[in-house]
Amino acid sequence: MIPRRPRLCVCAPRVPRPVEHPLNESYEQKKATTVLVKVAKQQSANTTADLLCAMRHGQLEVNAIHCSAIITACVREANWQLALQALAGISQLGLAQDVVSCSAAIGASRRTGRWTLAQELLTATRNTGIRMNSICCNTAISTCETNGQWLVASAILGDMAALQLTSDVISFNS
């Protein structure tokens, strides 16, 4: 089986013609969100991204929760490329990224050995003015620890104190 190349069309222009997909225009936004989140939990990240594309082409509103659902599915699959596309898609849609989506994107890099990506995402999150929390930092610490980067993990732990975030059992166990 040839692996599918990740794609995400959250920023694609809306198509004026209807497109066949499981979510048509008659569905309310809440129902669309419920279906997308369920698909993200049960299906692949690419399937979730395809559904999001269908929503977008079908004139349904796409929001940060939808993009975060894709990122969460990416964590399960360690699909850091698609996670980054979805994170960027939030901004490209003119929506605000939040600590949940950023933390999930950091988590997608954990099992792939991309500790530098986790560190860069953590720094970018801080630089964009998103209020950090201990979960976001713990995810980055865990990513560094998993990849044997103890000094970087210790530095992030020190940053938590500077940001007045409470270190917890997860912080120290990583």
Image: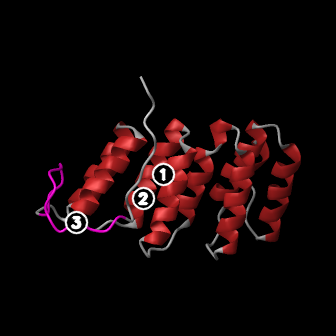
What is the total number of numbered labels drawn onto the structure image? Answer: 3
* Residue that numbered label 3 is attached to: 15
Residue in the picture at 49% in, 70% down: 91
Q: Residue furthest top?
A: 1
Residue to which mark 1 is pinned: 71
* Element assignment for label 1: helix
Q: Tell me residue 171's x, y (percent).
A: 74, 50
Relative depth, front residue between 129 and 86: 86
Report the Cα–Cα distance between label 1 and label 2: 6 Å
Instruction: Check the image and report above or below for 36 versus 126.
Output: above
Residue 95 is left or right of residue 121, and the answer is: left
Q: Which quarter of the figure has residue 146?
A: top right
Q: Secondary structure at mark 2?
A: helix
Mark 1 Cα shell of 10 Å, populated few (<14), some (14-19), many (≥20)? many
**Which tag, 1 or 3, sits closer to the chain's start?**
3
Name the disc covering residue 67, or none.
Answer: 2
> Residue at left 63%, top 72%?
131
Figure quadrant of the C terminus:
top right
Q: Residue at x 34, y 42 (%)?
A: 47
Amino acid type, residue under disc 2 in the picture: Cys
Tag 1–tag 3 contact (CB < 8 Å):
no
- In whole angstroms, how far apart are the C-alphas of marks 2 and 3? 19 Å
Q: Position of residue 39 (x, y in %)?
A: 31, 44
Give the mark toward the camera: 2 or 3.
3
Q: Which range of residues does the magenta coloring cover?
A: 12-25
Does residue 131 show up magenta in the picture? no
- Residue furthest to the left in view is 26
Q: CA distance from mark 1 to mark 3?
A: 24 Å
Rendering coords of residue 121 (x, y %): 67, 59
Colour style of the rendered protein structure:
secondary structure
The three-letter amino acid code for the residue at tag 3 is Val
